[in-house]
Image (tube, rainbow, N blue to C red):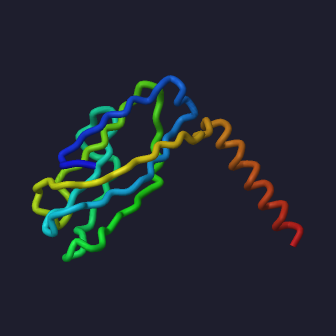
Amino acid sequence: MGHAPQEVIWTAPASVNAGGISISGAIEQLFEQSRVQRLAVFKNGGATALFSVDSLPPIVNGVVLQKVSFGPWDIAVAPGDTLKFRVDGSGAGGSGVPTFVAWDVTLSEFVIPEPATAGMLAASLTALGMALRRRT
């Protein structure tokens, strides 16, 4: 939590070798009714965000804050890949001016099957489907 803009860079360690990362979390704007903050994720220094999510302005009286949950966003990663998480005032409908924001992100590794394994699985499921269809 803090004042945007904020950037965090995560580097995939050697232990992240199953093929992918699932990203989920939430963003919550704390003040400033007219500003909308955006959390964007960039891979390996790319200029275009892979994903982004915008905060919602807090309720007018500031009594109720509106947390926006997101994800899971699944992306392929290899050891050494970097993900940059940037929060700024570029959210749609916002003024482009950053303000206070709270955000959290959870990264979970998942397995992306190699192409040969995925092909064998697809062929097996097709054959099973055809066998079941013939029985009826």
Question: How many marks on residues?
Answer: 0
* Residue that appears at 24% across and 55% down: 101
Instruction: Tell me which residue sits at (52%, 43%) in the image.
Output: 108
Q: Is residue 91 above or below residue 78?
A: below
Q: Looking at the image, which residue is at 23% across and 40% down?
A: 47
Quadrant showing the C terminus? bottom right
Residue 43, horizontal then vertical, whole percent? 34, 37
Of the pair 128 and 66, the residue shown nearer to us: 66
Horizontal placement of 79 versus 61: left or right? right
As drawn, the residue found furthest toward the right would be 135
Position of residue 90 measured from the top left corner of the image (x, y, whole percent): 17, 55
Snapshot quadrant of residue 127 = bottom right
Q: In front: 123, or 37?
A: 37
Image coords of residue 110 (percent x, y) = 57, 42
Residue 58 in the image: state x and y as whole percent: 24, 69
Image position of 50 with respect to 54: above or below: above
Q: Quadrant of residue 91?
A: bottom left
Q: Nearer the viewer, residue 101 or 127?
A: 101
* Up-down relation of residue 132 to residue 46 (above or below): below
Is 75 on the left-hand or right-hand side of 68? right
Q: Residue at x 47, y 26 (%)?
A: 13
With 57 as the anchor, is 96 left or right in this view?
Answer: left
